[in-house]
Image: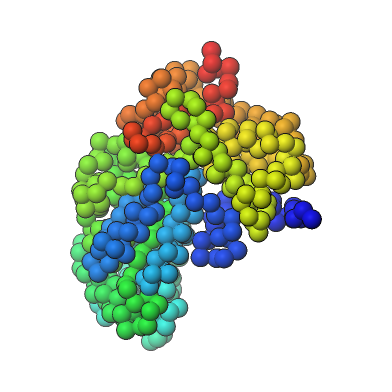
């Protein structure tokens, strides 16, 4: 008897904006480990650095890649693995706490402090900060907000910070005012966060049993979404935050994993970034899942993994090899599934987005015609933004398989016109397959 395809569950599983929570046993059924085909085992390297090479001394590691290539899902896997090995992991999406159009170093520090102290409280560890607590009360007075915190003797540290950030996140004027107040005290604030939150938290965790007793790890996701606009006439916001203030972000006394904007890998500041925030170590880049080799041959293993990703969303409880016998429950034939995987270029979110569009149009089995309609709509949304000069640039990338400089990045990679891959020879680049099929490119 064939397994039943639950259409509504399949549709929900194909939502391209959904991040799989690896620690959730249900979500884990949908996870496919692409490390063997991506050309680099990024998450294993991040984990090994913390658990084996430097478990007792804080580390600061940098992680980047295309938006939509699967970074958050991989970081959730890292979180689950570190938790399993006895670390207390604080994972959070910085977009929840910060306005990505305007971020400063003190904003990041307060966001980390709030998330760590909140996580520790949930774990049964309530911190009672001295200088930091007084500073937060002073901030509330300085902002002249109607929050009566001092009257509530037992109000928690994370709640104080939450009330402050709620006031400032949507008010550029208040945010600017707060920064003017905090900037001269940044080094003191860093010291207080270390002493009263991170070090004390680590001490309390060490007293616990096996759970969380190996110390704190903070994973700051979505910080790569910081707006690339100019901060000053000479510096972009990513350069200011991650390079100019990188040494301060690095000094938080716990294991840190920061997601950083991919544009910095194409900036003249990449060496300064590596030394100031990365401690001399180059940021780890998560490339696409390869669908072809450099020479144009089909990457059979990469395609096989992508087919499994699609079929796992439909039949999560079926063994991988047996899923291949169920292709016609989802598609009219195997070639339609292959076309979907190939045209995605190994960009996970694009693949799911095309599949999601097909399901909006018809029930499975999905026809080749329905898939081509979804591809055409996606292609047209890209083509309308491309100028004649950019078509020439795309042809040049196809010939050289390389992208150089920040201007090319902004034009090609940020717009998802070009994808990045990695093999034993290093990084290489290829045009988004949907654009390679256009008359404009072929002409």
Q: Tag count in the figure?
A: 0
Q: In this view, does 156 lie above or below 397?
A: below
Residue at image x 43%, y 28%? Answer: 294
Residue at image x 58%, y 21%? Answer: 438
* Residue projecting furthest to the top: 443
Q: Indicate the position of residue 270 as horizontal and vertical percent values.
A: 26, 41
The quadrant of the image that shows the N terminus is: bottom right
Residue at image x 44%, y 46%? Answer: 36
Q: Indicate the position of residue 443 as horizontal and vertical percent values.
A: 53, 12
Q: Can residue 416 be seen in this view?
A: no
Q: How is the image coloured?
A: rainbow
Q: In this view, does 114 lie above or below 68?
A: below
Q: Nearer the viewer, residue 190 or 368?
A: 368
Left or right of 300? Residue 333 is: right
Q: Is residue 208 above or below residue 338?
A: below
Q: Which of 123 and 139 is in front in this view?
A: 123
| Quadrant in the picture for residue 403 | top left
Q: In this view, does 189 lie above or below 403?
A: below
Q: Is residue 284 visible?
A: yes
Residue at image x 29%, y 49%? Answer: 242
Q: Indicate the position of residue 312 as horizontal and vertical percent values.
A: 62, 52
Q: Indicate the position of residue 329 as horizontal and vertical percent values.
A: 75, 45
Left or right of 325? Residue 436 is: left
Q: Which of 195 and 6 is in front in this view?
A: 6
Left or right of 183? Residue 348 is: right
Left or right of 214? Residue 309 is: right
């Amino acid at each position: 008897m064939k397994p039943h395809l639950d259409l509504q569950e399949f549709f929900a599983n194909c939502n391209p904006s959904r991040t799989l929570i690896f620690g959730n046993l249900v979500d884990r059924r949908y996870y496919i480990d692409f490390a063997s085909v991506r050309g680099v085992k990024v998450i294993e390297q991040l984990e090994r650095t913390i658990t084996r090479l430097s478990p007792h001394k804080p580390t600061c590691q940098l992680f980047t890649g295309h938006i939509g290539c699967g970074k958050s899902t991989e970081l959730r896997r890292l979180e689950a693995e570190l938790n399993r090995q006895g670390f207390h992991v604080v994972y959070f999406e910085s977009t929840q706490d910060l306005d990505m159009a305007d971020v400063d170093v003190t904003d990041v520090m307060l966001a980390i402090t709030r998330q760590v102290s909140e996580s520790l409280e949930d774990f049964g560890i309530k911190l009672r900060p001295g200088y930091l607590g007084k500073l937060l009360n002073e901030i509330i007075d300085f902002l002249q907000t109607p929050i009566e915190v001092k009257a509530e003797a037992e109000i928690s540290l994370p709640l104080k910070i939450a009330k402050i950030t709620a006031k400032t996140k949507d008010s550029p004027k208040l945010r600017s005012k707060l920064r003017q107040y905090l900037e001269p005290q940044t080094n003191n604030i860093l010291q207080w966060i270390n002493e009263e939150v991170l070090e004390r938290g680590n001490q309390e965790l060490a007293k616990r049993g096996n759970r969380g007793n190996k110390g704190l790890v903070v994973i700051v996701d979505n910080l790569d979404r910081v707006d690339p606009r100019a901060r000053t006439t000479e510096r972009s916001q990513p350069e200011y935050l991650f390079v100019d203030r990188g040494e301060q972000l690095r000094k938080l006394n716990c294991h840190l994993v920061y997601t950083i904007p991919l544009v910095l890998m194409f900036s003249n500041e990449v060496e300064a970034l590596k030394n100031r925030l990365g401690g001399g170590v180059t940021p780890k880049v998560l490339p696409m899942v390869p669908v072809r080799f450099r020479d144009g041959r089909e990457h059979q293993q990469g395609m096989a993994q992508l087919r499994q990703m699609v079929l796992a969303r439909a039949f999560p409880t079926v063994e991988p090899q047996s899923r291949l016998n169920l292709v016609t429950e989802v598609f009219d034939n195997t070639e339609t599934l292959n076309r979907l995987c190939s045209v995605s270029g190994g960009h996970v979110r694009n693949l799911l987005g095309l599949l999601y569009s097909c399901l909006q149009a018809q029930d499975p089995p999905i026809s080749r015609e329905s898939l081509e309609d979804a591809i055409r709509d996606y292609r047209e949304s890209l083509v309308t933004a491309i100028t004649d000069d950019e078509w020439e640039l795309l042809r040049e990338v196809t010939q050289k398989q390389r992208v150089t400089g920040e201007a090319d990045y902004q034009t090609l990679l940020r717009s998802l016109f070009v994808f990045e891959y990695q093999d034993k020879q290093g990084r290489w680049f290829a045009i988004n397959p949907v654009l390679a099929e256009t008359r404009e490119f072929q002409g």
